[in-house]
């Protein structure tokens, strides 16, 4: 019995199911109550699952493409002919090719090379529908509880134990199943979904199961060997990967039970779990019958509001509201519907502005921006300290009643005919309607979508065009929009794609109507004059100026563009685009019109709503006298005197010249005095510094390194950092925050050249996996503060990391020693020679001529040895040993002075004296800094000794002997604090 939504808008409880268990499972004694496994193998649809080797091959191809897209497409004509772009491989549960095509040699289940997936769908030959209740072994609801709830069916039909320890319960349904997915750890595989039938591959690293695709996403750029097979072998060896088969074994010898409707089995099991009656178990047809009219609150809206009430604690409205809005937006609910839901929790109107900000952030976001939705909402709800069943109640209501891709098309506001662009848009639709209709193929609509995206029109306008061309089902053709919009690196020509569909004459007209990223035509100048006159007339008549008119004038007059990485605004200048802030922008308006009748808030909103993107050329550096082109892999840069980018941004814009003849002056003297040293292994200290700086000037992360300067206070570290800050854009996110991966913490770093932490915390760094991936340029997704925007970090928009400190934090975790580049700055500046204005003078540009030498030397030094190891293996070892001596002196000390010895002991006072003496001696030798001798507390000493196996306790020990009056000698005992199980090491 399916759940019904009755006329009185009440939901029937799943507890009211009146079928008996016998009726539900269709009386197993009847003839033909089972479908045999042989019939499933004969008539079911199987396809080969991906192997790890295929995934690594795809990653190799993807890397070849990302290195040089144009060259790749020229040399690999197949990709161009098939209009495809290489992608990071999908999970290992995905098909090797696709559902309709299998690799040569695959002959169905139990194949030696490929695991098999089975499609859960209608099998016409058997007159029914194959379904699987997929129980995952996760913590949401314990596995033993789910086993008990479904025990009524598990001993009557075919059940497989999955690789993760869950179950696949196979059923054959006479009626078509329609229930939606439960949000708990039970999946309902039906109507086109598939399950692993026999085995799939798992990948292990150091005996721990890992996600191969995550590893590939982080390190695909290391698959650089042109020989694909060798590259894959090197990757597997480097990361110590072991590839194993994970089998899905039957736990019984049953065939597949036939039931009237597998929905009833799922309902019965959920009912046995004690899920609350007010949970929605809605069918697809139920959803279609819901009234979606936009009154104050629809029926479904009331259900959602009731389920949300327990979660709206004080101070949590913004986060929950943001994620809920993103979720509803991505599931095609209108802005008005979402606003009504949020307003239910805003009876006094105090949150009106907050709600407005949330709605605008989501519904007016830029095309291609990743809006947080179900995943973020799901994670957020589960974090609440609230009864689990209440959480699952809300999650199930959201998932089954609201999360869908059917029955409710995107609600697009009608386009305003008074909008100045509406005439052009209508003309464009008329041209396109000659070539695109409802009968157009999906590939053709994808090409149109890609063309419109490349023309940089808004997503709202794209939806209007698709609605006009493809009718009621236009939203289905937009389902692939995210994939298309994510092809921002593509070098495929949009015009070339369209030229296969529409005539050249029509394409030319279309290009004239739809705006391009940058247009220097006479039409733009006319537009500027048109809007200028319109605004002037409104000022003269003392009329209010529409922000839309103002925005059109701004875009035409100033040709402002927004950086696609971090949303900073840029204006064109004779020497290329330069970043501007709101103050400078406001000056433009005041110069043009004087005081105008638009409030500051509206002007600011217009400024930050500039949506014409400007691309970045990561291999170009701007100097005051021209541009420097960095070759993709070569070692010789090309300087073009007097040339500047006009239609894109360079990676870096330096405020001084590119000058091979610069001498360095005072900057050079400071640097050579600070960094030229004779310490063993650091004889190339200055050169290593320049290589690190040169690497920071490159368009992407080419070496996975973290550069750290270490030295006592007053040793020029801060001055050197000022030299970096003068030339490069920088953020100052503490490395400890990168390790913690706290919400919003990384947002200031996106798109910067370097990230500087000039006060490394002395606390221990542990769990450094996030730091390692950040260093490699794969730090995951960054959530931007005060918005619903998420940006994926990659090796181009992730800054290189610099650190500087007197004390270094101990590090626990693998990989740090491979990434560390340690630069010693050991010499203190004589107080007589300190220039208190030097650092501010550097930042103000007073030493720019000297910095010309500084950056010229850095870039050329790095490029000369670009294709060689960054430092030698011996240098790495010396750097890491030096780091350890400066970071964990106590641990080094106790390892040098003591050793583990069962039953032995060292007195507490003696141990402390030895440790302090060691530190003072090492300070005199210059091995450690004076700061490391501070705070040698008893607790820190105790912790260090415990790390080598010592235990502190109060023991009775013999301190000597005494003689009594009769001349008899007795041991003299005393209770003392000692460290047991250690002894002093013998000196060699």
Image: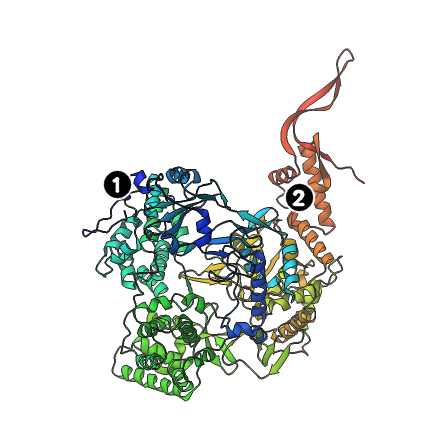
Q: Is residue 923 left or right of residue 117?
A: right
Which residue is found at the position 32% from the left and 42% from the top? 24
Q: Quadrant of residue 760?
A: bottom right
Which residue is located at x 72 percent, y 57 percent?
Answer: 873
Q: Which residue is mark 2?
A: 891
Name above or below for residue 923 compared with residue 960. below
What is the spatial separation of the Cα atoms under label 1 and label 2, in whole angstroms?
A: 70 Å
Residue placed most toward the observer, 835 or 821: 821
| Secondary element at image label 2 | helix
Residue 178 in sight? yes
Label 1 secondary element = loop
The type of colouring in the image is: rainbow
Task: Locate residue 31: give its quadrant.
Answer: top left
How many dots with numbers? 2
Query: Where is residue 166 drawn, in percent x and y?
Result: 46, 44
Near-viewer residue (694 or 193): 193
Q: Nearer the viewer, residue 264 or 341?
A: 264
Give the residue displayed 29% in from the left and 74% down from the top.
415
**Could you say which quadrant of the image residue 724 lies in?**
bottom right
**What residue is shown with label 1?**
18
Answer whether residue 840 is visible to the viewer in this image. Answer: no
Assess disc 2: are there few (<14), some (14-19) or many (≥20) residues with their C-alpha within 10 Å of its C-alpha: many
The mark nearer the N terminus, 1 or 2, is: 1
Q: Position of residue 606 (x, y in %)?
A: 36, 73
| Residue 40, position as x, y percentages in the image | 44, 50
């Amino acid at each position: 019995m399916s759940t019904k939504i009755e006329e009185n808008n009440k939901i029937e409880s799943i507890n009211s199911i009146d079928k008996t268990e016998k009726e539900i499972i269709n009386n197993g004694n009847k003839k033909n109550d089972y479908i045999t496994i042989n019939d499933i193998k004969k008539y079911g649809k199987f396809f080969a699952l991906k192997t790890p080797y295929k995934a690594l091959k795809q990653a190799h191809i993807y890397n070849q493409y990302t290195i040089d897209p144009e060259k790749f497409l020229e040399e690999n004509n197949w990709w161009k002919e098939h209009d495809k772009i290489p992608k990071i491989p999908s999970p290992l549960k995905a098909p090797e090719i696709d559902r309709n095509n299998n690799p040569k040699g695959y002959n169905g289940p139990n194949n030696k090379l490929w695991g098999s997936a089975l499609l859960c769908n209608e099998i016409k030959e058997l007159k029914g529908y194959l379904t699987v209740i997929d129980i995952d072994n996760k913590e949401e609801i314990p596995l033993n509880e789910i086993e008990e709830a479904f025990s009524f069916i598990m001993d009557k039909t075919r059940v497989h134990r999955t690789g993760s320890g869950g179950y696949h319960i196979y059923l054959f349904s006479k009626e078509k199943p329609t229930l939606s997915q439960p949000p708990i750890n039970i999946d309902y595989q039906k109507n086109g979904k598939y399950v692993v039938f026999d085995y799939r591959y798992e990948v292990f690293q150091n005996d721990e199961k890992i996600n191969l695709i995550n590893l590939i996403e982080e390190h695909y750029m290391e698959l650089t060997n042109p020989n694909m097979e060798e590259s894959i072998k090197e990757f597997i060896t480097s990361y110590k990967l072991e590839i194993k088969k994970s089998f899905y074994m039957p736990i019984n010898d049953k065939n597949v039970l036939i039931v009237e409707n597998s929905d009833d089995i799922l309902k019965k099991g959920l009912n046995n779990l004690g899920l609350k009656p007010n949970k929605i178990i809605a069918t697809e047809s139920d959803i279609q019958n819901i009234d979606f009219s936009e009154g104050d609150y629809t029926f479904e809206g009331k259900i959602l509001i009731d389920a949300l009430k327990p979660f709206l604690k004080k101070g949590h409205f913004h986060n929950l509201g943001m994620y809920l809005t993103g979720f509803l937006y991505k599931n095609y609910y209108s802005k008005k519907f979402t606003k009504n839901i949020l307003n239910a929790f805003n009876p006094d109107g105090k949150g009106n502005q907050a709600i407005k900000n949330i709605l605008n952030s989501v519904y007016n976001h830029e095309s291609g921006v990743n809006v947080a939705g179900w995943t973020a909402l799901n994670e957020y709800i589960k974090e609440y300290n609230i009864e689990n069943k209440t959480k699952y109640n809300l999650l199930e209501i959201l998932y089954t009643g609201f999360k869908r891709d059917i029955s409710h098309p995107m609600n697009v506001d009608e386009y305003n005919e008074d909008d100045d662009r509406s005439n052009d848009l209508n003309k464009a639709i008329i041209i396109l309607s000659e070539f695109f209709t409802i009968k157009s193929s999906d590939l053709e609509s994808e090409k149109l979508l890609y063309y419109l995206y490349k023309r940089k029109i808004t997503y709202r306008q794209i939806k209007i065009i698709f609605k006009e061309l493809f009718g009621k089902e236009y939203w289905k053709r937009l389902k692939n929009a995210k994939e298309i919009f994510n092809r921002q690196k593509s070098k495929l020509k949009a015009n070339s794609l369209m030229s296969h569909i529409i005539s050249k004459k029509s394409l030319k007209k279309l290009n004239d109507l739809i705006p391009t990223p940058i247009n220097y035509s006479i039409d733009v100048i006319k537009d500027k004059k048109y809007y200028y006159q319109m605004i002037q007339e409104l000022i003269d008549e003392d009329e209010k100026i529409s922000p839309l008119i103002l925005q059109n004038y701004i875009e035409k007059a100033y040709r402002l563009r927004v950086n696609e990485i971090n949303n900073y605004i840029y204006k064109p200048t004779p020497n290329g685009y330069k970043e501007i802030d709101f103050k400078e922008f406001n000056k433009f308006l005041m110069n043009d019109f004087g005081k105008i009748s638009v409030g500051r808030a509206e002007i600011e909103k217009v400024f930050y709503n500039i949506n014409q993107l400007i691309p970045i050329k990561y291999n170009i550096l701007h100097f005051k006298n021209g541009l420097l082109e960095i070759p993709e892999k070569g070692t010789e840069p090309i300087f073009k005197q007097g040339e500047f980018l006009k239609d894109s941004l360079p990676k870096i814009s330096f405020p001084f010249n590119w000058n091979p003849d610069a001498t360095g002056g005072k900057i050079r003297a400071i640097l050579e005095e600070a960094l030229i040293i004779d310490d063993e292994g650091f004889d190339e200290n200055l050169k290593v510094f320049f290589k690190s700086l040169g690497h920071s000037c490159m368009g992407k992360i080419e070496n996975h390194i973290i550069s750290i300067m270490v030295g006592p206070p007053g040793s020029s570290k801060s001055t050197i950092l000022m030299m970096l800050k003068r030339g490069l854009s920088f953020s100052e996110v503490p490395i400890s925050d990168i390790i913690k991966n706290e919400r919003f913490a990384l947002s200031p770093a996106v798109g910067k050249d370097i990230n500087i932490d000039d006060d490394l915390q002395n606390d221990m760094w542990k769990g450094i996996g996030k730091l390692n991936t950040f260093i490699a340029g794969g730090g995951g997704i960054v959530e931007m503060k005060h918005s619903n925007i998420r940006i994926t970090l990659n090796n181009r928009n992730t800054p290189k990391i610099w650190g500087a400190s007197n004390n270094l934090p101990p590090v626990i975790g693998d990989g740090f020693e491979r990434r560390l580049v340690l630069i010693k700055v050991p010499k203190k500046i004589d107080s007589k020679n300190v220039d208190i204005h030097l650092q501010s003078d550097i930042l103000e540009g007073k030493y720019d001529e000297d910095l010309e030498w500084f950056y010229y030397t850095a870039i050329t030094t790095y490029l000369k040895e670009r294709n060689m190891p960054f430092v030698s293996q011996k240098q790495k070892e010396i750097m890491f040993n030096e780091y350890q001596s400066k970071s964990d002196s106590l641990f080094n000390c106790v390892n040098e002075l003591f050793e583990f010895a069962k039953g032995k002991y060292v007195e507490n006072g003696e141990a402390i004296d030895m440790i302090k003496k060691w530190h003072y001696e090492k300070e005199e030798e210059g091995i450690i800094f004076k700061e490391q001798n501070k705070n040698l507390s008893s607790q820190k000493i105790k912790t260090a000794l415990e790390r080598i196996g010592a235990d502190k306790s109060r023991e009775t020990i013999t301190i000597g002997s005494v003689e009594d009056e009769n001349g008899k000698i007795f041991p003299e005992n005393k209770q003392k604090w000692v460290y047991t199980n250690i002894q002093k090491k013998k000196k060699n």
